[in-house]
Image: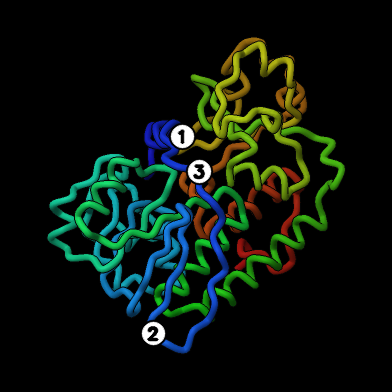
Amino acid sequence: MITKKLFLAAAFIFLFLAGCTKKENEKSSSKFSLIDDLNVTVSFDEHPKRIITLAPSLTEMIYQINYDKYLIGNTLYCNYPEDARKKKKVGDMLTIDFEKIISLKPDLILISVEGNNKSAYDKLIELGLKVFVSNPRNYEGIKNTYLQIGKIIGSEKEAKLQVTEWEKSVNYIVTNSDSTKSKTVMFLISLNPLMLAGKNTFINEYIDLCGFKNIADDIKMSYPVLSREEVLKRNPDYIVYANSGAMAIDKIAAAYPEWKNLKAVKNKNIVLVGADQYLRPGPRFIPALEDFFKKTRGSLPADSLLRR
């Protein structure tokens, strides 16, 4: 299970905030090129058959698109689906075993901006390995990454069909949410310190797409730490806490004595969500979005993934 400690560390080490990905053109030739989220052009002579993923979200995408037989390695935190635990481990995202990677002879390494550090990226390039970087900052970014992986592995059609299914859920949720965004949400990554998901994160999409306003949307930092006084001042209507283990809602409400005065506590609008599912910008974003919608709006899309 990806730990809260890892996520907190990852939140502080944004390597690069890079440009947008370009939508790739279909080619009849097996050779093709894609621009990754560092704005680096990566060329392929053929579809890779020995892939290493250095982030759980990327591992989940490989499995979602049924290409896991070509996944030869991943990280210690790649725990979903269950079979991902059986792959050879090349580190814990922040500490990479380069010798192990070399021994596996990968023809592609998928790396993320959140979670992996710049020195690891530089070392992989120095070793002459092919690296493709993703940096999904929102739902559109998650779709782009998924479609790019689909292109890379030769499953572009399947990836597009999956994205079409995602769009159905997103469209339902947006249509049935409060467009005025009259209610506010504090999405907690950590209780101590009080770290929140800010506007420039894919996590903010849960809040925005479901028709709420992020209490931290005026703060430039992706994961700001607020004082107790500032939380009281902003007084959220909902408190959402991403937790890796079991925690009772009343413990969240009693985390700080003054929280008894918050609207979220008074109205019992405290929502606990799973950290692994909610804090990974991968294919489980849609089930997480539907779960968020259900817990805050009380209903589900007619063809919800959660119903299947």
Which of disc 1 and disc 2 is earlier in sequence? 1
Query: Which amino acid type corresponds to the residue marked 2 in the rendered image?
Result: Ser
Quadrant of residue 266 within the rendered picture: top right
Q: Which residue is mark 1?
A: 11
Dot 3, how many residues are within 10 Å of its Cα: few (below 14), some (14-19), or many (20+)?
A: few
Specify the label residue 30 is tagged with.
2
Which of disc 1 and disc 3 is earlier in sequence? 1
Mark toward the viewer: 3 or 1? 3
Quadrant of residue 116 within the rendered picture: top left
Give residue 40's position: percent from left, percent from top: 42, 58
Q: Nearer the viewer, residue 148 or 83?
A: 148
Q: CA distance from mark 3 to mark 1?
A: 13 Å
Q: Which residue is mark 3?
A: 17
Give residue 262's position: percent from left, percent from top: 73, 19
| Left or right of 20 on screen, residue 267 | right
Q: CA distance from mark 2 to mark 1?
A: 38 Å
Query: Which amino acid type corresponds to the residue marked 1 in the rendered image?
Result: Ala
Dot 2, how many residues are within 10 Å of its Cα: few (below 14), some (14-19), or many (20+)?
A: few
Give residue 190's position: percent from left, percent from top: 51, 27
